[in-house]
Amino acid sequence: MKQSYLKLDHVSFRYREEQPNVLKNVNIEIYPNEWVAIIGHNGSGKSTIAKLMNGLLYPTEGNVVVDGLSISDETVWEIRKRVGMVFQNPDNQFVGTTVKDDVAFGLENQGVPRDEMVKRIHESLSAVDMLEYEEHEPHRLSGGQKQRVAIASVLAVQPDVILLDEATAMLDPKGRRSIMHTVQEVREQREASIVTITHDLNEVAMADRVIVMNKGQVWFEGTPRDVFQKQDGLREIGLDIPFVAKLTQHLTEQGVEVERQPLDHEELIQQLW
Ligand code: ADP
């Protein structure tokens, strides 16, 4: 059987001694080159999982293993190289005065040699279509452009897992679609694994596998189609299936071929006509 790359092994977590566990015996495995979406209502533990996956938090009980390394003070820096994270608000992620400096920052931290650094900055900004902005000031960019630069900074470090924690939440549908397609391409080119934490069930549809969290536990795990078929259950835990996903499901059932799950009705129409 294929080995998972990243594993939360019987993980429980609480922020403070006196508090109850916010994660209870969570088992999650992420395989190489897989795209996994984690969904669930506010407070169900998704961000806590993301922070455990890249060593920003350590489990209270259980173990987090990345590429065979168990999380500890000795391994945490190696783990952070392997798992790159993009957050919801790009403004909190910038450290450089230009886009180029910003992407360079993570590489300098890792002692990447100068020539290699120039190459990686060029490649990662090209991948997100932001090369022409390399001398621009990050805070003057649009929300979508900022998020693309944040992704480039993560890509430059060449992580094996890219974690996006509500990374498209602040964008309009067009910006969101463009980011998701960039991520899709990166996965194909770099064979990275993608973990997206999202409220957008249209985005969920792009994943290979979906994990639904409820009250700190894994409530359900399956393909997007499996998840969308649990409409009543999802509604009970406060999630609703997007119209375009319902429509796509209906069309597929009627024998209409939809190449891949569209992110919105415009994309669905483009696929059909
Ligand atoms: P989600 O990402 O699904 O919204 P979180 O992982 O952010 O959920 O939160 C899970 C639970 O942990 C919530 O009850 C939240 O209030 C609590 N929590 C999150 N961050 C902290 C923190 N820094 N200190 C104490 N409790 C926290």
Image: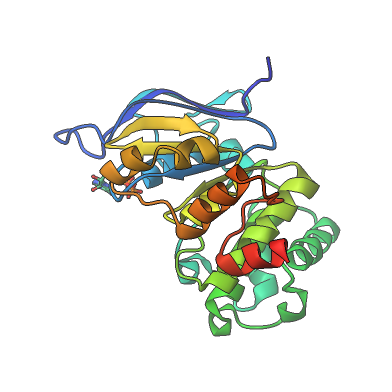
Residue 258 pos. (x, y %): 68, 51
Which quarter of the image is occupied by the N terminus? top right
Residue at figure coordinates x 30%, y 51% from the top left: 42
Quadrant for residue 185, please give it.
bottom right
| One can see residue 209 in this view | yes
The number of callouts visible is 0
Q: Is residue 164 left or right of residue 178?
A: left
User: What colour scheme was applied to this rendering of the protein?
Assistant: rainbow
Q: Is residue 145 left or right of residue 237?
A: right
| One can see residue 96 in this view | no
Residue 9 pos. (x, y %): 45, 22
From this view, report whether residue 152 is shown above or below residue 25.
Answer: below
Residue 94 pos. (x, y %): 53, 69
Q: Is residue 2 left or right of residue 243?
A: right
Query: Which residue is more in the foreground, 37 or 263?
Result: 263
Residue 209 pos. (x, y %): 56, 36
From this view, report whether residue 192 is shown above or below residue 87.
Answer: above
Query: Which residue is more in the foreground, 186 or 249?
Result: 249
Residue at figure coordinates x 71%, y 56% from the top left: 156
Residue at figure coordinates x 66%, y 74% from the top left: 99
Query: Which residue is more in the foreground, 57 or 129?
Result: 129
Query: Which residue is more in the foreground, 268 or 15?
Result: 268
Seen as rendered, the residue at the extreme left is 18
Which quarter of the image is occupied by the C terminus? bottom right
Residue at figure coordinates x 72%, y 77% from the top left: 134
Seen as rendered, the residue at the extreme top is 1
